[in-house]
Image (cartoon, helix red, strand yellow):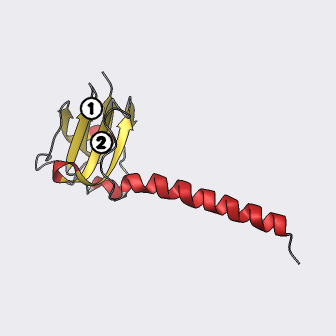
């Protein structure tokens, strides 16, 4: 037979992990952008023009030389909050066509639309 206490603890642990994962994944699925006051300064990357669709946000300074393959051909708009800025590029290691963005960009220019392979964020 099995230990009933162990089974209960395992079920509670599994439920906690499921709730945590749901909350984390909700940000990257179809939830609206997070409250601007709670996460600023930040740069948020969206899969649809006008800041729609799936998204992820970066806070503070961060260099990403190789954007995850799920995102690199999907980014269409960028929201910039409270003094943050970002340099996005069409190739890995911040090469290729690049653009410095320090204000909201509801639609990326054609060379970078669905083609963000690397970036560097800054805050103030």
Question: Viewer-proximal residue, 78 or 121?
Answer: 78
Q: Cβ–Cβ below 8 Å for labels 2 and 1?
A: yes
- Label 2 Cα neighbours within 10 Å, binned few <14 / some 14-19 / many ≥20: many
Question: At which x and y percent is residue 16?
Answer: 62, 56
For label 2, the SS is strand
- Label 1 Cα neighbours within 10 Å, binned few <14 / some 14-19 / many ≥20: many
Q: Is residue 64 visible?
A: no
Q: Quadrant of residue 37?
A: top left
* Residue 72 left/right relative to 16: left
Q: Residue furthest top?
A: 124
Q: Is residue 63 visible?
A: yes
Q: Is residue 89 above or below residue 52?
A: above
Question: Viewer-proximal residue, 70 or 79?
Answer: 79
For label 1, the SS is strand
Question: Viewer-proximal residue, 82 or 113?
Answer: 82
Residue at point 20%, 30% (across, down): 102
Question: At which x and y percent is residue 30?
Answer: 32, 58
Inter-mark Cα distance, 2 to 1: 8 Å
Q: Quadrant of the C terminus?
A: top left
Residue at point 27%, 27% (across, down): 82
Residue at point 19%, 33% (across, down): 101
Question: Viewer-proximal residue, 2 or 118?
Answer: 2
Q: Quadrant of residue 1?
A: bottom right
Question: At which x and y percent is residue 27?
Answer: 39, 52
Say whether disc 2 or disc 1 marks the residue closer to the N-terminus. Answer: 2
In the rendered structure, find residue 44 and report the number of the disc placed on it.
2
Residue at point 86%, 69% (across, down): 3
Q: Which residue does the numbered mark 1 point to in the structure image?
A: 81
């Amino acid at each position: 037979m099995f230990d009933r206490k162990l089974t209960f603890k395992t079920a509670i642990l599994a439920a906690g992990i499921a709730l945590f994962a749901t909350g984390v994944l909700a940000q990257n699925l179809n939830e609206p952008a997070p409250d601007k006051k709670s996460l600023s300064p930040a740069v948020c990357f969206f899969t649809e023009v006008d800041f729609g669709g799936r998204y992820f946000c970066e806070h503070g300074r961060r260099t990403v030389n190789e954007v995850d393959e799920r995102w690199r051909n999907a980014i269409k708009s960028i929201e910039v909050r409270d003094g943050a800025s970002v340099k996005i590029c069409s190739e890995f290691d911040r090469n290729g066509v690049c653009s410095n963005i320090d204000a909201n960009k509801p639609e990326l220019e054609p060379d970078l639309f669905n083609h963000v392979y690397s970036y560097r964020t800054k805050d103030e």
